[in-house]
Image (cartoon, helix red, strand yellow):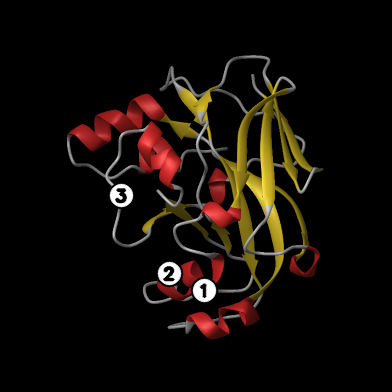
Amino acid sequence: MKIICIGRNYAKHIAELANERPTHPVVFLKPDSAILAKKMPFFIPAFSSDIHYEVEVLVKIHKVGKHIDAKFAHKYYDEIGLGIDFTARDVQSQCKEKGLPWEKAKAFDGSAVIGDFYPKSNFDLDSIKFQLYQNDTLVQDGNTEAMLWKIDELIAYVSQFFTLKKGDVIFTGTPAGVGRVSTNDILRGTLEEKEAFQVKIK
């Protein structure tokens, strides 16, 4: 499987990081070694002093597709989930300053939390509410209605470049409110008010 991530898909998040609004989805990959094992804590890596949480709605692909038309994209997934794209913000800033790729900041071991998945029929895909709590304090409050590119548009775009295969997961972008994690934090993600994951920081 591969993990395909979308950056800068929520306008307020673009603004909070003072990034340029893109004309096309920003795409990057995480390897399968980035997946944080279920019920395992996230260990802050030694190479960063500024790890940020980024909660995101996830889509799990369930059949092979290439050059998918947006009007047919709904046929390629039937589950929606929630996860975290952990980001070494200090490392990312250094990479961006030098015009280098972001993989060291985004694709390191354990940087992808993949929570529970639910049937997509449970949701109005254009208006999915999702939240992230840090030690029971609400820090990110998102809704897919604010996406610059909707799920089916993302699948169509990504499939121009990568063949999508069964089990691939797409991280669809994070809303505003990203922030730093600290040792002993508890992060809890909810999808339409139902808990999808909980992670302890060490």
Mark before the other along the chain sequence, 1 or 2: 2
Quadrant where the image shows the C terminus: top right
Q: CA distance from mark 2 to mark 3?
A: 18 Å
Query: Where's residue 165, x and y in %?
Result: 56, 74
Q: Residues within 10 Å of mark 1 (few under 14, many from 20)?
A: many
Q: Looking at the picture, how far across and down is residue 163, in whole percent?
A: 46, 76
User: Viewed as shown, does residue 137 lie left or right of 176?
Assistant: right
Quadrant in the picture for the N terminus: bottom right
Whether tag 1 and tag 2 are in contact, CB under 8 A, the answer is yes
* Crowd around label 2: few <14 · some 14–19 · many ≥20 (10 Å): many
Q: Nearer the viewer, mark 1 or mark 2?
A: 2
Query: What residue is pinned by disc 3?
Result: 21
- Quarter of the image for residue 185 reads top right
Task: Indicate the amino acid at tag 3.
Answer: Arg
Q: Residue at x 38, y 57 (%)?
A: 27
As measured in the structure, the alpha-carbon distance from the residue carrying label 3 to the one carrying label 1 is 26 Å
Q: CA distance from mark 1 to mark 2?
A: 8 Å
**Residue at (53, 61) in percent of width and height:** 2
Determine whether 72 is above or below 97 in the image: below
- The percent coordinates of residue 137 (x first, y second) are 70, 22
In this view of the protein, which residue sits in the foreground, 100 or 179?
179
The residue tagged 1 is 164
* Contact check, label 3 and label 1, Cβ < 8 Å: no
Mark before the other along the chain sequence, 3 or 1? 3
Between disc 2 and disc 3, the foreground one is 3
Q: Name the N-terminal-most of marks 2 and 3.
A: 3
Q: Amino acid at mark 1?
A: Leu
- Find disc 2 in the rendering and name its residue: 158
